[in-house]
Amino acid sequence: MSYLTGVPTGALRGRDKESDALRALVDRAGAGAGGCLLLLGGPGTGKTALLDLAAAYAAGETPHGFLVLRTQGVRGETHLPYAGLHALLHPIADRLDTTAADMRMLAEALRAGVAPGGLALPAALLRLLRTAGRPVLVCADDLQWLDAPSREAICFVARRAVAAPVAVLLASGEPGTAPGDLPPLPLAPLDERASCRVLDDLVPDGLPGDLRTALVRAARGNPLALAELAGSLTGAHRTGTAPPPETPPRGGRLWRAYADRLRGLPADTADLVLLIAADPGIDAATLVRAAESRCGLAPLEAAETAGVVAETPDGGFDLADPILRHVAYAEAPLARRQAAHRLLARLYDGVPGGEHQRLRRAWHRAAALDGPADHLAEDLVRALAAAPKAAAKATAFPEPFRVLERAAELTGHGEAKAARLAAAARHAWQAGQPQRARSLLSRIDTLGAGVEVRGHAELVRGSLELRAGTTDSACDTLLAAAERLLRTDREQAVRALVRAGEASYLAGDNRRFLAIARRAETLRRPDDDHVTRLALEYLAGMAATFRGRHREATASLRRVVTGVTAPPSAGSPSALVWGGVAHLLLGNGADALRLASRAVEMARAHGAVASMPQMLEILIQAQLWSGRYDAVAANAMDGLRLAQETGRATSGAQHLAWLAFTAAVAGDEETCVLRAARAVELANAHGVSVAEALGTLALAHLDVAANRHADAVNRLRTVARTGDPLVVRVMATPLLVESAVRTGDIAQARDALVILDRWADSTRDPDRLALAARCHALLAPPAEAGERFSEALELHRQGACAFETARTRLLYGGMLRRSRRPGAAREHLHGALETFERYGARLWSEHARAELRAAGESVRPSGSRSEAGRLLTAQQFQIATLVAEGATNREVAARLFISPRTVEHHLRNIFARLGVRSRVELTRLLS
């Protein structure tokens, strides 16, 4: 079984390449030409599991009938000569009972622990294995603990196994203890996808997404850490009332392995390791001053040699593994830990480094309890407030939420304690740790907190619900928070109203949004600060837009886009998002793209992981406006990953819908349907009407591309309902008009066009005006249609969306062909085909080719794609390309967010369509 998961060893997650290498070595040995591999990896990385896999394969899955011999180094037997060989040869000890001199010598060594020096004994071992009568697999685990004579003899065989039916697999977990001349197979940490699959094996009934992400983050790709973390979960962890475990349980296998490694360090080295564990990333100058009485940093060499300490990219020092850091700190007695913190606090007192060093000093004083608790708590809060942005980043040490949590622990007064816990919860949420944020909030409930503190707590709780719960519940909680905060913190009260408005927008509840906007309007005051005025203008502009009063909305929205670039809002990612949305509603796609890009860059710089999915939503909308579908797909994939990591299901639903839309543009029906279905499923579970509408829009686009116009009309009727967001309805209108005209429902087409006309006219955006003109061309009598199409193309030339230009040219070319003007038609159809091929839009390219053939032109397959590209769907071609580059099925599945079984299904179809029989032939074809 592997990784304590209960999964057969043939299914080691994330170790496909290593498993293949071991099987290949066994196969070569079975054919008479063996060899050796040395597995290198720290505790818990899966070395033993891989040896188990190789042993099971050799014993039962090959036709050669292997003899499998195993041994394992034991720390307590390191001083016993030939103890390792004694365990290895025990199954065949009877073969040593012969008259051959070398076998008698070998038997005596195992009995008495003594043997003559030189080559005699290693050569006897090699002959014994070569003459075993069948292939042999030798597995030696924990090579670093094998006694020296056994290790030397086994390595002697390993170097000569290439000419014998012998495979030797060695595993070592300590740096510098294995021979450097043997072929290494280092075990890297599992990637995120494999780690998640290990957790799925461990917990078949599933874990909340944010808890799963927290465990993956804590394990850092260590399979045993994943198993032990999962095994330590309690009901409180699952419900979010306890923070997720950050380390494997004390006393577990991994903890003991790390503690053993640390116990082998000299005393001076251990003191420096404790300092580094207490202050991760400590700079070399500070560490030198700390070590002045210990002969400088010379003792640190032993820790570096043992793989305990590593240099950070910025020249500081940290332990090689965060789990190792926790063990090093926790295993030290309390008195030593406090002494280390007091020393570090003195070192940071008055040294250059400004407020960041002040924060570290306050942290170490608080950890050492070096003063009255209330004073230490105040010092922590003041130091964090004064810290520069780089020091207050979510990923900096000490992390802001931990600083505030520690301050709360040192605070005796209930109100101040609750306020610090609420602030800690907000920082944890912004750092992408919703599970810890919920845990911090749950501690406030037992305290006698006042109205303002409860308002701040409800604002965080409502924000959590908005991203991971249901939109209705989020809206209720955020409105309650706003009412509590109005008298004491107007800026946060208005921010709560903005988020409540976002919740109603996502839910498609325009009535509630308008009610929130009316409430916000009553709060305006002449002395409002800049950010509060900006937020109120944003709500007013959105409300007017939703009422269809576009000219009224323009004034408020323009004040928003002007205000977000002026201090103090210029440094706020949230304000930049408001500006991006306002630009979109004003029809300024390029400006929306600029602001959204700045918001994403700023969120990345601040380490605001939790806000990234939302920032990317606005960026994607702006990119979609200009037809940048490759960028949309890349950012939506990134947004989906971040949403899954940070427990933001509502955002994940929208990113899935965008991915479904880009698949529809590419003509990849299977992927579009799968992603749209998942988006709609998530949307229904969390009340995200926007994502449901976007998923439906993606399917409708696919229907139009596939000439299923009746199906498209039926889908788009739901998108066109009053509750759906204006931007989605505007996007849907050109598709609905086209399909309604094709199905003869002219009245519905005209009704749908009213909204697009009104909005495009108010924004004067050339791209939207061009779409409206195209719709009017489709509805116009034949005598007027040409003029309308020409108007649309002229507007397209002023805009930015090449894909929609091609769509207009395709429709115009089709009309010209039906009007018996094939020459004029072919000009537009060729232009459309060229654009569609550039976009990889398979179904639209087929449309253009069909129209060209109908216009009397013989059309050759596109020269911009290979013959394979022409024969395969977009997703099949992508899978074929990845496989040809050497990716395994699991790696392809991870890249494309599909299951390995789906990859296998596609590969069978790819082989059939291309007439190839293997991956090798596929690679040759595509190269």
Image (cartoon, rainbow, N blue to C red):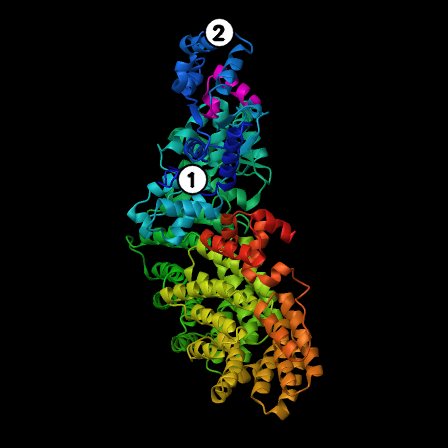
Question: x and y percent of residue 435 in the render?
Answer: 38, 52
Q: Within the magenta stretch, is there residue 357?
A: no
Where disc 1 sits, the SS reads helix
- Which numbered disc, 2 or 1, marks the residue closer to the eye? 2
State the extent of the magenta-drawn residues as a range.
Answer: 134-160
Identify whether 474 is placed above or below 112: below
Identify whether 210 is placed above or below 287: below
Give 247 or 377, whichever is nearer the viewer. Answer: 247
The disc, 2 or 1, on the residue closer to the chain's N-terminal end is 1
Q: Which mark is residue 277?
A: none
Identify whether 443 is placed above or below 126: below
- Res 476 seen here: yes
Badge 2: residue crowd in 10 Å (few <14, some 14–19, many ≥20):
few
Which residue is the site of mark 1? 10
- Res 527 seen here: no
Where disc 2 sits, the SS reads helix
Q: Residue at x 53, y 34 (%)?
A: 186
Which residue is the site of mark 2? 101
Q: Quadrant of the N terminus?
A: top left
Q: Within the magenta stretch, is there residue 151?
A: yes
Horizontally, residue 313 falls left or right of residue 53, namely right
Give 788 or 830, whichever is nearer the viewer. Answer: 830
Question: x and y percent of residue 234 in the render?
Answer: 30, 45
Give 207 or 725, whichever is nearer the viewer. Answer: 207
Number of marks in the rendered image? 2
Question: x and y percent of residue 515 in the render?
Answer: 39, 77
Spatial CA span between label 2 and label 1: 42 Å
Badge 1: residue crowd in 10 Å (few <14, some 14–19, many ≥20):
some
Which quadrant of the structure image shows residue 111? top left
Which quadrant of the structure image shows residue 219? top left
